[in-house]
Image: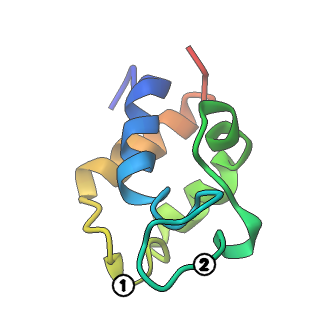
Amino acid sequence: LRGITCGLAHCIVAARCATCHAANPSFDGIGAPPKGVVMETAQQIRRWAQPMRQQVASEAMPPGNLTDITDEERGKILAWVAGGARLD
């Protein structure tokens, strides 16, 4: 996968990660962002890109795949991080 944009990565993270990793999580039962990791803006997502890469690659996140992230979406996040997690 090449040319994955920040916008696409952001859309995936918004749908699959930010339900918990938000200042005010919307996922039922989550009252605060796990480990204080907030990924709502492109800059926040980029800040956490490397730790996110580890969690996504190992399939540790999302736990139990509660948000139904697909292998294709995982691949796109990993490609974006491998490409330097660019904001443009």
Name the residue that disc number 1 marks: 64
- What residue is at 69 percent from the left and 50 percent from the top? 48
Image quarter hosting the C terminus: top right
Left or right, 72 with respect to 47, comes to left
Q: Position of residue 8 (x, y in %)?
A: 37, 30
Q: Is residue 46 left or right of residue 72?
A: right
| Amino acid carrying mark 1 in the image | Gly
Residue for point 69% across, 32% down: 43
Q: Tag 2: residue type?
A: Gly
Question: In terms of secondary structure, where does tag 1 sit?
Answer: helix
Distance of label 1 from label 2 (alpha carbons): 19 Å
Where is residue 78? Give x, y as percent.
47, 46
- Element type where label 2 sits in the image: loop
Mark 2: few, some, or many residues within 10 Å (few <14, many ≥20)? few
Query: Where is residue 55 shown, x and y percent of the image?
Result: 55, 67
Where is residue 87, by image quadrant?
Answer: top right
Write down the residue under mark 2.
Answer: 31
